[in-house]
Amino acid sequence: MSRLAKVMALVVVLVSLSAGAAFAFGAVIQCKGAPPCVATGDRDVVNERIGDGKADDIILKGGDDIVHANKYGRDTDVVRSSAGDDRIYVNDGDTRDTASGGKGEDLCIVDARSEAKGCARVQVDR
């Protein structure tokens, strides 16, 4: 096999691997506007609205989702899970949030245990 053919074969393999990684999750959802913010039902990554003091209501519809409602504080974020094994982050420095687990094996990362409702696993991370 020539050197050029080997390089081309390597390029084809690398492109196919990177394309697979790009489709590993469904949508990347940036919540905007008035709540609620609703996931698609695939394996989504959901980000809370940008800015401190903006309360979010995030509804998951299934799939193994990751929710980041932990970047901005001084707000009341409510995340409601459904089916799927979700990872819900509400550890934003205040204890006003609620991470509600659903039918799956959800992991809720919170500032205080009181923020977790029905989660299969809870991690308190301040």
Image (cartoon, grey):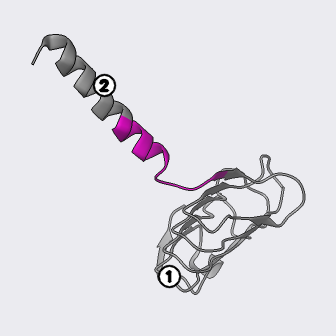
| Residue 21 belongs to magenta span | yes
Q: Upstream in the sequence, badge 1 or badge 2?
A: 2
Q: Quadrant of the N terminus?
A: top left
* Of 113 and 88, the residue lying toward us: 88
List x then y, in percent, for residue 122. 49, 76
Q: Residues within 10 Å of mark 1 (few under 14, many from 20)?
A: some
Q: SS of the residue at dot 1?
A: loop
The three-letter amino acid code for the residue at tag 2 is: Val
The three-letter amino acid code for the residue at tag 1 is: Gly
Q: Residue furthest right?
A: 34
List x then y, in percent, for residue 35. 85, 64
Q: Quadrant of the C terminus?
A: bottom right
* Of 123 and 20, the residue lying toward us: 20
Q: SS of the residue at dot 2?
A: helix
Please identify the quarter of the rendering in which residue 102 is found.
bottom right
- As drawn, the label of residue 11 is 2
* Of 114 and 39, the residue lying toward us: 39
Q: Quickly name the residue at label 1.
A: 104
Give the residue at x 90% y 59%. 34
Magenta range is: 16-28
Between the residue at mark 1 and the residue at mark 2, the CA separation in whole angstroms equals: 39 Å
Give the residue at x 67% y 64%. 40
Give the residue at x 17% y 20%. 6
Give the residue at x 50% y 82%. 104
